[in-house]
Image (cartoon, grey):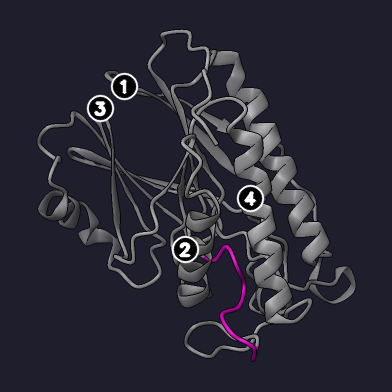
Amino acid sequence: NKKIDYKYDDNDLLLEISMVDSHHGKLGSKESDGGNYDIKISRKTFTDTVVDLVAKGKCYGNFEKILLWTGGDFLTCDNDDNTTTKGTPQSVDSRFTKVFREGKEILIDSINYLKQFAPVELLPTRGNHDSNSMYHLGEVIDAYFHNDENVTVYNDPYPRYYYRYFNNAILFLHGHNVNWKKLSTVFAYECKFWSACENREIHTAHRHSEQVITEPGVITRIIPSITGPDSYHASHAYVGSKRQAQAFVWHKNNGLQNIIYSKQIKS
């Protein structure tokens, strides 16, 4: 598709939509797990949340671009055996091939919706549940939008992605296999534009709940999830986290301007 002639307000803003740990394909039961979750529910939950965050973000005007971050564990399984990458069995609603295909359609639909408002950049981070399948899905989405001048896909196999928006440096990673106390040091060591940016944040996931860690020179944000419960979370008493997503409004020079919370989802 040719470049859309977007109408900007000259407000130099980026909208980051963080949809982490969606676990598409997960199966949960109200009776045994505390809430219902399946492919249809997860698809509607994801798309409704994206629409909600954009509607709230539009009060700031027109954005220069929109960054959609999947955050890892977008898919709940990684193979035909319905296990995680390392082989842990999962409660899955259907066949892996159907889960993968549904995930593809969710991302295509979401990107096509978002690009009505601004150029879209997709960052399809791999998680501990979907390390292989998410990389393959990222390649599929990149191929699908290959000739679309309004969409960019950053499907980097490296486990950490350093994103720059003018005076802002953001480290994105799923966060399942790192020492979080070392992340700020790793950030400073690996990021080529660390010293050139005054505003620095680490956005990570995996824990399904919101946390904020402030250190000299960098803020780490653990992003909450919209995913529903399953037998593992119920049996291990991983309950009580608010089910919602976040979006971040970034000014190119002045850094983070606001955090937008999606509507809370009831199990």
Magenta-tinted stretch: 73-81
Q: From the viewer's perspective, is the residue at label 4 or at label 1 nearer?
A: 4
Question: What distance separates the C-alpha of mark 2 from that of mark 4?
Answer: 12 Å
- Which image quarter holds the N terminus? top right
> Which residue bears the numbered disc 4?
108
- Chain-order first, disc 2 or disc 4: 4
> Which residue bears the numbered disc 1?
252
Q: Are marks 1 and 3 in contact (CB under 8 Å)?
A: yes
At a point 52% along the width and 12% down the height, the residue shown is: 7
* Residue 239 in picture, x, y percent from top left: 67, 63
Say few, some or many: other residues with alpha carbon within 10 Å of mark 3 (under 14 / 14 to 19 / 20 or more): some
* Residue 116 in picture, x, y percent from top left: 62, 28
> Which residue bears the numbered disc 3?
166
Question: What distance separates the C-alpha of mark 2 from that of mark 3?
Answer: 27 Å
Q: Amino acid at mark 1?
A: Lys
From the viewer's perspective, tell me whether residue 40 is left or right of residue 6. right
What count of labels does the image hold? 4
Q: Is residue 177 above or below residue 156?
A: below
Question: What distance separates the C-alpha of mark 1 from that of mark 3?
Answer: 5 Å
Q: Which element carries disc 3, helix, strand or loop?
A: loop
Q: Amino acid at mark 3?
A: Phe
From the viewer's perspective, tell me whether residue 212 is left or right of residue 266. left
Question: What distance separates the C-alpha of mark 4 from that of mark 1?
Answer: 27 Å
